Amino acid sequence: MKTVINIKTDKEIKISAQKLAKEMGFSLSAVINAHLRQFIRNKEIYFSISPQMSPGLENLLGKIEFDIQRNKIFLIPYRLERSLKIFCFFMKILLP
C-alpha cells in the first residue's frame, strides 16, 4: 500500500533535485524512496560537512597540477592577486 509524505523544502532545492533525478532517469519519488530504504536497511544517516569539489573543478586543478609538474606554470608576483581572484571565481562556480 502506498502512502504520501509531505515535507517542506526550498523551492530551488526541489526543482534542482527533480531536474537531476530526471537527468539520471528517475523520478524524485524514486530517489527519496531509495534513500528511505537505505536508511531502514543500514540504520544510519550519512551527512557530509566537508566540501567536495565538483568534477569540473577537479579536472581544472588536475590540469594545473600537471602543468606545474612539467614546470609549465610560472607564478609572477604581480599576477598572483589576479590569479587568486580567478581561482576564487571558479571555486564559487564549480563547487556544488
Image (spheres, rainbow, N blue to C red):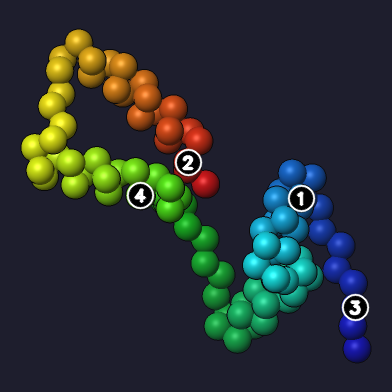
Q: In this picture, is 19 found above or below 93? A: below
Q: Residue at x 14, y 40 (%)?
A: 68
Task: Point out which mark residue 94 bears.
Answer: 2
SS category of the residue bearing label 2 = helix
Find disc 3 in the rendering and name its residue. Answer: 3
The residue tagged with tag 3: helix, strand or loop?
Answer: loop
- Closer to viewer: mark 2 or mark 3: 2
Label 4: which secondary element: helix
Is the N terminus in the top left, top right, bottom left or bottom right quadrant? bottom right
- Horizontal and vertical percent position of residue 88: 39, 28
- Crowd around label 2: few <14 · some 14–19 · many ≥20 (10 Å): some
The answer, for residue 20, to whether it is visible in the render is yes
- Residue 91 image offset from top left, x and y in percent: 42, 35
Q: Nearer the viewer, mark 1 or mark 3?
A: 1
80 horizontally vs 10: left or right:
left
Lateral position of residue 96 relative to residue 5, left or right: left
Q: Earlier in the sequence, mark 2 or mark 3?
A: 3
Q: Of discs 4 and 2, which sits in the foreground?
A: 4
Which residue appears at 74% of the width and 74% of the height? 30
User: What amino acid type should be assigned to the residue bearing mark 1?
Assistant: Ile
- Residue linked to disc 4: 59
